[in-house]
Amino acid sequence: MCTPNDSAVLHAIFNPSAPFGDICGDKGNYIQEDLQLENRFPADLLEEALKLELSGVKAAESGDLETAVQKFNEAIERLPDWPSAYNNRAQALRLKGDVTGALQDLNHAVELSKGMGIAGRQALVQRGLIFRLRGNDEAAKEDFQKAAQLGSDFARQQLVQLNPYAALCNRMLRDMVKKLQEPDKEGKLTD
């Protein structure tokens, strides 16, 4: 099962002009899990930051990326050590075409989360995707391995795709299935 953030990243990649958001599941469950991991923040500031993040996510889902970034900036001002806000702002920045800014936010989110918990996992997956899209498969593989260890099924799938032997096997299997589906004119399978 994918996290809402994993799905939002996938949705944004395959539908770049569409707004991003929670595609599979209830983000509230993941926020609760993060809250348990991040109990070091004052409750009132955390509540404010979460409300701002939610406003930012809603703005981004409606296509208003400027407002989304503004809300995530405000959340970061309230809690500069809260990695979730950097993850969300990274998504909005990437959708705006600011991949460099997105990478900076993802690096900061990984640093703040110590590469652990949901925020760390999400930042690693997002950063791995950006690395992969930029052709840096080694860095992508490293991030996907860490995210997979934190429970990301999507990262595991990406690792399989980055494996050259798996790619070769998949291509051979695809070719064999194609041959089985397309017999020659005499009813025989082609070589």
Image (tube, helix red, strand yellow):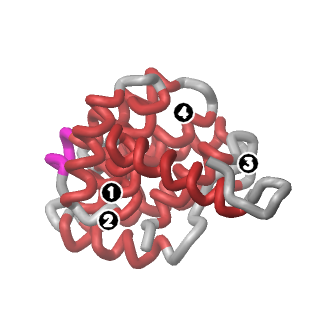
How crowded pointer 2 is (Cα within 10 Å; few <14, some 14-19, many 20+) is rated as few
From the viewer's perspective, is the residue at label 3 or at label 4 nearer? 3
Above or below, 21 relative to 60: below
Looking at the image, residue 135 sits to the left or right of residue 36; the answer is: right
Earlier-in-chain disc, 4 versus 2: 2
Earlier-in-chain disc, 3 versus 4: 3
| Pick the front one: 103 or 169 | 169
Q: Position of residue 41 (x, y in %)?
A: 20, 60
Name the disc covering residue 126, or none: none
Q: Amino acid at mark 4?
A: Leu
Q: Amino acid at mark 1?
A: Arg
Residue at image mark 1 = 156
Above or below, 20 relative to 100: below
How crowded pointer 3 is (Cα within 10 Å; few <14, some 14-19, many 20+) is rated as some
Above or below, 138 relative to 123: above
Q: Amino acid at mark 3?
A: Ala
Residue at image mark 4 = 93
Q: Amino acid at mark 2?
A: Asp
Looking at the image, residue 16 sits to the left or right of residue 109; the answer is: right
Name the disc covering residue 44, or none: 2
> Which secondary structure, mark 4?
helix
Residue at image mark 3 = 18
